[in-house]
Image (spheres, coloured by chain):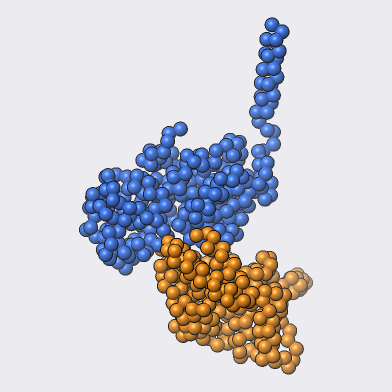
Amino acid sequence: MKRAAWLLALALTACPPARVPPPLIVAPGTSAEAALADAEASFGKRPDVAEVRHALLLFQTAAVADPARAEGSVGVVRSVAWLVEHGAKEDRKALVEAAVAAGTECQQRTPGTAPCNYWQAVALGLAAREQPLTALSGLPRIIDLLKKADAEAPTLDDAGAARVLALLLVRAPGWPVGPGNADEGVIQAQKAVERAPAHPLNHLALGEGLAATGETDAAKAAYQKAVELGRARGDADGADWVAQATAALAKL
Amino acid sequence: MARMRNVFCSIVVALTASLSLAAPPKAPPAPSGPRALVFCAPGYPGTTEEAQSRMDEMATAIGELSAWPKDSLNAKYFPNEKAGLARFAETDVVFALVPLPFFLSHEAELKLTARLAVVQQGLEATQQWTLVAKKDAVKKAADLDGYTVFSTAGYAPDFVTRVALQGFGPLPATVKVTSGGQVLSALRKAASGKEKLAVVLDSEQAKALSTLPFAADLEVVHAGPKVPVAVVATLGERLTAAEWKTASGAFLKLPSVERGKAALEGVRLTGFAPLDEAALAAAKKAFGSPTK
């Protein structure tokens, strides 16, 4: 009996469940500050996927190096949000799990702060997209986190909370099944545009909302604005958003 | 005479050949190439991309139960009528899973044959559509003069006026039917009474009507006849009778196997059921579908 229990324990040790990420070993004396700086430098090299993956690792390192700070956890979610869209499809599940864990970690370290509320909502949103069966039940919590973040820090991530809330309301199933409401989504997107008018993503979100409510001409104008602003940025993100807006325009 | 015999002989050879071609296959019928199941539900939430993982699960489950070779069935979802129609035009699409308004609107052009009823979670296979308007504003069809009638089925205006509102009486020519996914906003506008707006709700929406904070300002004016909610249809001759026989068994068995049950839950369905032929025939008659 004892032997059986020992074998079972050995088996569990040898085959840890896939969901548990291996612990990150950080060399003693590693500075969170330095890791964060390096992570930001790597993250700035988008669209190089390898660099963003390296940034993710560095953000995780920063989070381990200083358990009192939340920037590393936030960086993990930011990196994953980008990698989910640009990296390999087969990595998505593990990446999203890392983001959800980082969102929880952020809340444990600096509970209820705007960055933690916002980025945890983003992480849960990514998880909802990966797990559509459980997505509907999780939407009220995401909405709550976004509203709190929006109230506390309306310009965080270029009005990110209003923008993400807009997209959620436009894309989610509507009454009576879910909280979706494209009209309300348009209002949130307009709010995001007012607060950060130079950010192409806010115009993209507005375009999507207007298209969903049948305001085709206004949607076209919003997408065209996103194209214009994306081109003006002259960077990889800008090019990405130009491509998204152009594809959306073609569908109208 | 010899010539006559040659002709006769040719006929016999041709008949023999055609008979041998028509002989039933010994092995279970399997598709010759990848086939597709297309869900097209205009105005429903989600995008083609977002729904793909759930579509893959449905295709795998149906393919397995049909004993079709792996990856010989794929599935795609379109929340947009135009995109759905474009996909249906491709000959690899053999199954259509569509709401009744879509089916009736495109039955003739796509050569659709309704095969099974779709059963959504919490609903029956048939439903009544309900006309809702500002309290005391609409009592009879003539009161809809100058009204806009909003419905998620508004992409098929003839369905709304002829099938959903069947029995309400002749509608004024001024009635305009509109569509969209924003039912809640439409109900709020209707309740305010600022616009001449009435809303035609499906049974799921009608069931939830009383939960709205402004429900007291609205009134159920008319409930139409029971009609199928959505159907599984085949397209033209793209699937043989034998193939459909195998596939229909697969559709019906889905809820009884774990993988099928999970796939159905992913698209908010309970399963599939035999069609209510009488309800469908009545709906087709009201719509004015050509009789075959």
The residue lying furthest to the bottom in this view is A29
The chain shown in orange is which? A
**Residue at left offset 37%, top offset 46%:** B158
Q: Residue at x 36, y 51 (%)?
A: B129
Left or right: where does residue B239 sit relative to residue B189? right
Which residue is at 57% across, 74% downward? A230
In the image, residue A32 above or below residue B264: below
Relative height, residue B127 to residue A214 (above, below):
above
Residue lying at 54% horizontally and 49% vertically, measured from the top left: B86
Image quarter hosting the N terminus of chain B: top right
Q: Quadrant of residue A59?
A: bottom right
Residue B255: x, y in percent?
A: 55, 51
Q: Is A98 placed above or below A25 here? A: above
Query: Taking the image as drawn, is residue A111 in sight?
Result: yes
Image colour assigned to chain B: blue
Dividing the picture into quarters, in which one does residue B243 lie? top right
Instruction: Let me know if residue A125 appears in the view.
Output: no
Task: Answer left or right for A50 relative to A212.
Answer: right
